[in-house]
Amino acid sequence: MKRLASAVTVLLLCAAASGCLTVADDDGPILSIELFWDARPETDSFVAGTCNSADVERMEWKLILHREGEPDEVVAERDEECHNAIDVLEPERGDYTLEVTGRTEDGGALWNVECTGLTVLRFDVAYECDIEAP
């Protein structure tokens, strides 16, 4: 009986604490993509920066799902204020490409990239995407 009480106590503490592993499959995975903008577009070397340090005002992006034997599908796209990350909640399992274009205050497209090899399986995944100026 003492063992059962200890096991129940451990389970309750685990449930109350953050970071415990559960086997519940209520929610799908999260695809997190950190965006690193070229903070020195006038040079040949890439310097990872943020929207602010790179002076990126707006961004356009498309997330494309690739399925074998089927045409590619754009599953999300936006034209919005610049962000340093994109989180996609409950994406379908598969391989993705992220196309990103960054724009200056006057609307000029200065940053552009395709980040490939973004694979979503069952669990949350995170990727980095370096967005270079051409």
Image (cartoon, rainbow, N blue to C red):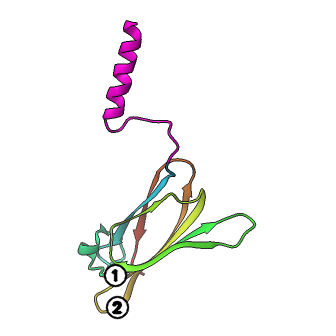
Residues 9 and 39: in front is: 9
Amino acid on which disc 1 is placed: Arg
Residue 85 is drawn in which quadrant?
A: bottom left
Q: Quadrant of the C terminus?
A: bottom left
Label 1: state its secondary structure.
strand
Amino acid on which disc 2 is placed: Gly
Q: Which residue is mark 1?
A: 58
In this view, 112 is above or below 115: below
Q: Residue at x 40, y 72 (%)?
A: 131
Residues 24 and 118: in front is: 24
Disc 2 packing (10 Å; few <14; some 14–19; many ≥20): few
Residue 102's x, y, as percent?
Answer: 38, 80
Residue 12's x, y, as percent?
Answer: 35, 27
Q: Residue at x 36, y 76 (%)?
A: 44
Residue 100's x, y, as percent?
Answer: 45, 76
Q: Residue furthest top?
A: 1
Q: Quadrant of the N terminus?
A: top left
Residue 92 lies within the magenta run: no
In the rendered structure, find residue 107 and report the number of the disc placed on it. Answer: 2
Residue 8 lies within the magenta run: yes
In this view, 16 is above or below 54: above
Tell me which numbered mark, 2 or 1, is placed earlier along the sequence.
Answer: 1
Residue 14 is drawn in which quadrant?
A: top left
In this view, 132 is above or below 88: below
Q: Give the residues drawn in magenta, as a range.
A: 1-26
Do tag 2 and tag 1 residues touch (Cβ < 8 Å)? Answer: yes
Residue 107 is drawn in which quadrant?
A: bottom left
Label 2: state its secondary structure.
loop
Q: Residue furthest right?
A: 69
In this view, 97 is above or below 119: below
Is 75 displayed left or right of 12 in the figure? right
Q: Residue at x 72, y 69 (%)?
A: 70
